[in-house]
Amino acid sequence: MEKGYKTVMLNPVDSVAVALSPIPAGAAVEVSCRGRRFTVVLRDAVEFGHKFAVVPIRKGQDVRKYGEVIGAATRDIRVGEHVHVHNVEGKRGRGDRDVRGKSS
C-alpha cells in the first residue's frame, strides 16, 4: 500500500475524502477520521483538492464533506470514484429551487 498519498476527512459521517496531492487511478490509500479507517483503491485519478468516495453513495443520497451536505448523488457512486460535478448536484445557492415564490 502506498503511504505517500495524503488525504483529509474531517468528520466521521463524511462520505468523501479530499486528496491533498494528485493521486493516480489504481492507487490504494488509507483514510482515517476519529476512529474510522478506510482503505480505498481509487477507480479514477483524483487531482489535488478533489473528492473521492470512501463509502458507496446511492443515487439521490446526500454527499457529505467536512460534516456538511454538499450535494446529492446524480447516480450511484462506488467507493474510490472521483466525486465532482459529473456525479453530484449541489444543493447550496440554488436560486432555481427557491420555494418562497415571487416577491411582492
Image (cartoon, rainbow, N blue to C red):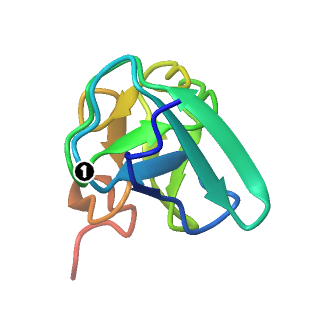
Left or right side of 83 for 31: right
Q: Where is residue 101 in the image (x, y as percent from the top left)?
A: 32, 66
Q: Is residue 15 in view?
A: no
Within-10-Å neighbours for mark 1: few <14, some 14–19, many 20+: some
Amino acid carrying label 1: it is Ser
Residue at 42%, 38% (x, y): give it. 52
Tally of marks: 1
- Relative to 99, does residue 27 appear above or below in the rendering? above
Q: Is residue 10 visible?
A: yes
Left or right for 92, reference 76: left
Mark 1, secondary structure of its residue: loop
Instruction: Kindly give the residue lying farthest to the bottom in the view shown.
Output: 104
Residue at far right of view: 35
**Residue 7 versus residue 85 in the image, above or below:** below
- Determine which quarter of the picture holds residue 32: bottom right
Where residue 82 appears, as percent x and y from the top left, is 34, 30
Q: Which of 99 and 2 is in front in this view?
A: 2
User: Quadrant where the C terminus lies?
Assistant: bottom left
The x and y percentages for residue 65 are: 49, 59
Q: Residue 11 at x, y = what percent?
A: 63, 66
Q: Residue at x 39, y 54 (%)?
A: 6
Look at 51% across and 67% down and name the residue there.
66
Q: Name the residue under label 1.
A: 21
